[in-house]
Amino acid sequence: MTRETKFWLVKAFEDYLTAKHEISFPEDEIITTAVCFHSQQFIEKSLKSLLIYQGENIPKIHSLSVLKQLCLEKYPSLGKFDVSKLEVYSVGARYADDFFVPTIDEAKECFAIAEEFKKELLSIFGISFQEVLNWIKQYRNR
């Protein structure tokens, strides 16, 4: 695994951990916008890490559907994920013109997709969640 792939995975899992932390609060304390955004970002950066792992250049886009399509030839198991549900929570939705507050159910659904995607991603790379946590610590302590 290249240094660049590992870096993208670290960045992706920082988003995953942020969403996981936020969704763990009592429902009336959950910032649903954060859960949905960081779940979307986790999947976006994960897909980009797969492209880099394949030796591809990553497009500077936020569309999960397009990124997933680019990965499907080598990773057909990604076809089972409906990442389009998270498209609305991309960077563009964070501007005042498009701003909205997702419901608790929407936040839970976004995180559930991210959680299942995480399992598949770790399987594809043949790594454990603990390995990724160790990489995050290494980047933090350098």
Image (cartoon, rainbow, N blue to C red):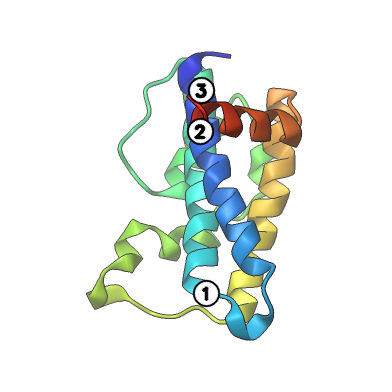
Crowdedness of circle 2 by 10 Å Cα count: few (<14), some, many (20+)? few
Amino acid type shown at disc 2: Arg
**CA separation in Å, label 1 and label 3:** 30 Å
Name which of mark 3 and mark 2 comes first in the sequence.
3
For label 2, the SS is helix
Q: What's the amino acid at mark 3?
A: Thr
Which of the labelled discs sits on residue 31, or is there none?
Answer: 1
Q: Tell me if residue 93 comes above or below residue 16 in the rendering.
A: below
Query: Mark number for residue 52?
Result: none
Rendered image quadrant of residue 25: bottom right
Residue under label 3, please give it: 5
Q: Which of the marked residues, 1 or 3, is nearer the chain's N terminus?
A: 3
Quadrant of image for the N terminus: top right
Identity, as a three-letter code, of the amino acid under mark 1: Ile
| Mark 3 residue element | helix
Question: Seen from this angle, which residue lies furthest left?
Answer: 97
Q: Nearer the viewer, residue 37 or 47?
A: 37
Whether tag 3 and tag 2 are in contact, CB under 8 A, the answer is no
Of 132 and 72, the residue lying toward us = 132
